[in-house]
Amino acid sequence: MDERIYQVAERIVEIHQKAYEVYLPLVEDVYSRAVSEDELSYLLDHLLDFACDEKILKLFKRVCSKYLYIYPGCIKLYIEAYREMWEEDCYSVEIP
């Protein structure tokens, strides 16, 4: 059973690494130019799915900081979504 858990954990790390490799150039593109709110939302939706990973969270924060004053309502919604989706999980885990 321990070996199976290790394999699952290893696969999750691989998936997060692949997601980072895919999203890094997209974030760099969005960061380098002006985008519509729809395009921004599309990217943030996908980053949010992987924001439990520290590297992807940094990408998420980078995009949010760039567009905070351009689309404040949109960014606020995504920050709240992040907190609801990921921060509550961190605090609700019980350590035996």
Image (spheres, helix red, strand yellow):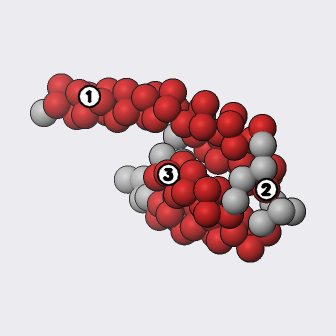
Image x and y of residue 73, in percent: 74, 73
| Circle 1: residue type | Tyr
The residue labelled by disc 1 is: 6
Q: Secondary structure at mark 2?
A: helix
Report the residue at 50% width, 63% height from top: 85
Q: Which mark is residue 46?
A: 3
| Circle 2: residue type | Tyr
The answer to whether the residues at label 2 and label 3 have Cβ atoms under 8 Å apart is no
Image x and y of residue 62, in percent: 74, 44
Q: Nearer the viewer, residue 83 or 40?
A: 40
Q: Nearer the viewer, mark 3 or mark 1?
A: 3
Image x and y of residue 16, in percent: 44, 34
Say which label, 2 or 1, has the lower sequence index: 1
Q: Residues within 10 Å of mark 2 (few under 14, many from 20)?
A: some
| Circle 3: residue type | His
Q: Which mark is residue 67?
A: 2
